[in-house]
Image (cartoon, rainbow, N blue to C red):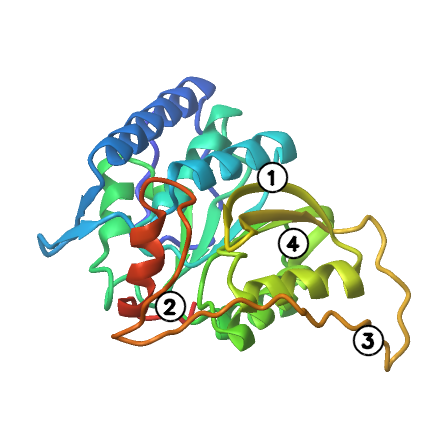
Amino acid sequence: MKQPRNKNLSREAMQPISPKWAAQASRRLHAYLDALAASPKLVADDGRLYDVYPVGLTPERAGLLVEVCRSARPRATLEVGMALGVSTLTILEALLEGGPMASRHVVIDPFQQSQWRNAARRSLRLLGVEELVEFYEESSLAVLPRMVGEGRRFDLIFVDGNHRFDYAFVDFRFAHELLTAGGVVVLDDTWLDALHLTVRYAETNLGYTICAAAGRTMGRPAILALRKPAEEPRRGCSHFESCGCQDFVPFFDGPDAVVPVPSEEADLGRRADGMAGVECAEA
């Protein structure tokens, strides 16, 4: 069954898709991602050619995302930070592998047009799955609290937006409000101090447990999946458990930065070295 077009990628109810169409779409996505891994280049709407790395998820990290989707079997999913769309395509592949999706995959990326020239959305169109995405080209600082106010809930949330601590922490804190009990949040680049500290806060103050990890950089996991507890921990109005880290690692940002990152995967050196030249997505 052909899917209906939805140029605005809105919250309108999805028209049903057949199991056969879902399986075919999952196979298309899998083949496309395999081709990207072999030849990591993406064309944007304006013809610009982008290197998939260091921005896109490496195959090892994408593999974790697929396995988490398979085990969690989420009915509602949310992603902060799309960039070149590798993570978006990976999530859609895993969801469709399980059959017709229950709802659109929600994605937030304020720089999809201005910085990435719609490279990710072009891939979605080429693969015939753009209708399966509810897209917001706005800051997560605006979209996430709005969704909390609307009472929306998600079973799986992937956060890979701005990696400054204040943004990363706020993204996670709103993700916590939006997650269902027992839901899973996946955080990328958890080797960075800002994300490492956010993970420590989630564990020590909110009772999250790590349920999956992949890659090693600076002695830390490169990507982590954390499960929200079935019940909120009881906390007083001034409660705070120290989550300070004594093992911060040096990371120097800027155009002349030299980033001493040991190899996680074949391209991880390029990923870390390229961070200095990539504008933080304030997703």
Label 3 sits on a secondary structure element that is loop
> Which residue extends farthest left?
47
Dot placed on the residue nearer the N-terminal end, 4 or 3: 4
Residue at position x 33%, y 40% in the image: 266
Instruction: Check disc 3 and report the residue beneath it.
Output: 240
Label 4 sits on a secondary structure element that is loop
In the rendered image, is residue 150 in sight? no
Q: Quadrant of the N terminus?
A: top left
What residue type is disc 4 on?
A: Arg
x and y percentages locating residue 104 in the rendered image? 48, 44
Residue at position x 43%, y 44% in the image: 264
What residue type is disc 2 on?
A: Ala
Q: Which mark is residue 281?
A: 2
Which corner quadrant of the image does residue 178 belong to? Answer: bottom right
Looking at the image, is 69 positioned above or below residue 208?
A: above
In the rendered image, is residue 241 in sight? yes
Residue at position x 91%, y 76% in the image: 236
Between the C-alphas of marks 1 and 3, the distance is: 33 Å
Between the C-alphas of marks 4 and 3, the distance is: 26 Å
232 and 130: which is toward the camera? 232
Between the C-alphas of marks 4 and 1, the distance is: 10 Å
Mark in the foreground, 1 or 3: 3
Instruction: Check disc 4 and report the residue beneath it.
Output: 153
